[in-house]
Image: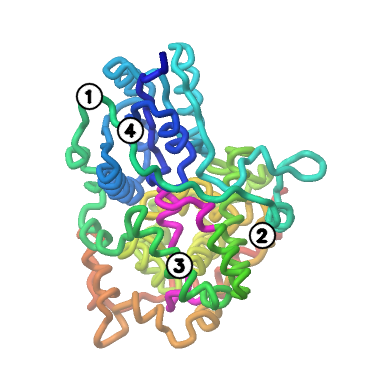
């Protein structure tokens, strides 16, 4: 007699139906599939913007599953406890999920797999979040890559499987277990005033992600290498938001990039390199989980960064009132859109850690609360790379000059005009939206005078270089 007991498909950061190895395998069995999302200890630990954006993705997945004759069961609680409850209620004998690699997720998943196996449950994890599983990419001496370029050269020509089609139907059980109500979770509540400002600027769900990739390949990838560095133009793919929640797979992006390259769009190689940079971050976090919590280069532990978040300069940085136009424009873009241009990320990170000499964890934590495309691996690598304490860091003594960087990448001040209101008689709608998004207690107005620099580009560079010369390591 064939096994017709249900399989629980535990969704996490894989909120799509297409190119989903775990879901495909579950549907192939012919057994009933119970899709489940758990607001668990890992979700609860996320910042305001990531949790808000995750809720939108969960709602979109619910609609996609309904189109396949299925539904998404919602539960809240410790992951292992919830899974055991749903197993008891449904008679399920298997749980499938897609692997994750950051320390919090791995710790949870190890506990879950061990507990379920002790219960006699078939607990299986599948690939799908990365192009290459971290243990499949090694240097010639057998270790993991600590420098990006050799890793890129090692994987660029690897054959990868094609993408998997979404199942035509997700087999439903005879009876569904009870489900919570997503609205009751209030996943966007901590966004406060920013909720209504950021919401219309989100691109949510599998279908929207696919269209975003298609539009990028069709219209912008030709100029990607140069345009991606210009914050005042729409020159990037924007896909970090969708990759974060698994609304699109990295494999789909990879194959689209290679097709574009073969079609003669040479800048597609730069896009492929960016996908491998994402892989690099996850391989590092898998092999060296300290990347998220402490200096990757442990000899930086003695470096005299400031750690007090109550400092006036930290407040000015967070509130986009440093008096450095590139920094403030980028920090205001963050408040209005929940995202920040990559060039802006490098500039604000360099200014905080080098000009202001503040610890990179202050910035890492702020981004983890504010970014709708927050990614645990890429956020950590980006901050440590900028600070100089991380792997493959641009020479640690390099200090980006935010003034000359603005002259180079925003010559016509399109980016500044889009986000800074104080110096313009008729500020842009996006610049004014900043004041609708920020907390009222910041007590800021577009009529305020633009501030003088907290630390000038020249003084900050001088102080940073002196600190590097005198470092005790």
Q: Position of residue 254 (x, y in %)?
A: 56, 57
Dot 3, crowdedness within 10 Å: few (<14), some or many (≥20)? many
Cβ atoms at labels 2 and 3 below 8 Å apart: no
Q: Is residue 308 visible?
A: no
Whichever of labels 3 and 4 marks the residue nearer the N terminus, that label is 4
Please identify the quarter of the rendering in which residue 424 is found: bottom left
- Judged by depth in the image, the label closer to the viewer, 1 or 3, is 1
Tell me the magenta residue range: 230-253
Placement of 276 over or under 85, stated as above or below: below
Label 3, secondary structure: give it: loop
Instruction: Indicate which disc residue 396 carries.
Output: 2
Instruction: Indicate which disc residue 341 carries.
Output: 3
Mark 4, residue position: 171
Whichever of labels 1 and 3 marks the residue nearer the N terminus, that label is 1
Q: How far apart are marks 2 and 4 (CA)?
A: 54 Å
The extreme right residue here reads 141
Q: Is residue 242 magenta?
A: yes
Q: How far apart are marks 3 and 4 (CA)?
A: 42 Å
- The residue sitting at 73% across, 43% down in the picture is 138
Mark 1, residue position: 175
- The residue sitting at 47% across, 12% down in the picture is 118
């Amino acid at each position: 007699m064939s096994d017709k007991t249900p399989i629980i498909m535990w969704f996490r950061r894989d909120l799509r139906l297409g190119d989903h190895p775990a879901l495909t395998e579950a549907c192939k069995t012919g057994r009933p599939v119970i899709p489940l999302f758990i607001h668990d200890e890992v979700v609860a630990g996320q910042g305001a913007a990531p949790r808000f954006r995750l809720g939108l993705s969960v709602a979109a997945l619910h609609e996609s599953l309904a189109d396949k004759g299925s539904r998404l069961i919602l539960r809240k609680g410790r992951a292992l406890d919830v899974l055991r409850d749903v197993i008891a209620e449904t008679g399920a004998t298997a749980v499938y999920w897609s692997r994750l690699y950051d320390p919090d997720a791995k710790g949870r998943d190890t506990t879950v797999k061990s507990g379920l196996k002790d219960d006699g449950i078939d607990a299986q994890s599948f690939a799908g979040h990365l192009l290459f599983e971290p243990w499949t990419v090694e240097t010639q001496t057998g270790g993991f890559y600590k420098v990006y370029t050799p890793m890129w050269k090692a994987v660029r020509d690897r054959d990868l499987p094609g993408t998997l089609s979404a199942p035509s139907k997700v087999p439903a059980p005879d009876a569904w277990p009870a489900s919570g109500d997503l609205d009751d979770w209030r996943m966007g509540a901590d966004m406060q005033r920013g909720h209504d400002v950021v919401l219309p600027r989100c691109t949510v769900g599998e279908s929207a992600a696919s269209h975003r990739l298609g539009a990028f390949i069709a219209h912008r990838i030709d100029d990607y290498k140069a345009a991606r560095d210009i914050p005042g133009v729409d020159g990037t793919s924007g896909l970090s938001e969708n990759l974060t929640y698994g609304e699109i797979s990295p494999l789909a992006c990879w194959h689209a990039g290679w097709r574009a390259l073969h079609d003669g769009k040479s800048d597609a190689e730069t896009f492929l390199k960016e996908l491998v940079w994402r892989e690099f971050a996850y391989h590092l976090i898998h092999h060296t989980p300290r990347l998220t919590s402490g200096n990757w280069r442990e000899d930086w532990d003695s470096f005299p960064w400031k750690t007090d978040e109550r400092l006036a300069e930290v407040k000015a940085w967070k509130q986009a009132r440093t008096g450095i136009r590139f920094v403030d424009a980028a920090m205001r873009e963050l408040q209005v859109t929940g995202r920040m241009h990559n060039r802006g990320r490098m500039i604000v990170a360099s200014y905080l850690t080098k000009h202001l000499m503040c610890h990179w964890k202050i910035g890492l934590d702020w981004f983890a609360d504010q970014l709708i495309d927050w990614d645990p691996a890429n956020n950590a690598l980006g901050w440590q790379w900028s600070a100089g304490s991380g792997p493959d860091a641009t020479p640690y003594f390099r200090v980006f000059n935010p003034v000359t960087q603005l002259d180079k990448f925003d010559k016509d001040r399109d980016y500044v005009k889009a986000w800074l209101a104080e110096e313009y008689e008729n500020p842009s709608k996006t610049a004014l939206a900043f004041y609708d998004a920020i907390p009222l207690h910041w007590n800021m107005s577009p009529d305020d005078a633009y501030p003088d620099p907290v630390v000038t580009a020249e003084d900050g560079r001088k102080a940073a270089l002196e600190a590097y010369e005198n470092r005790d390591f």
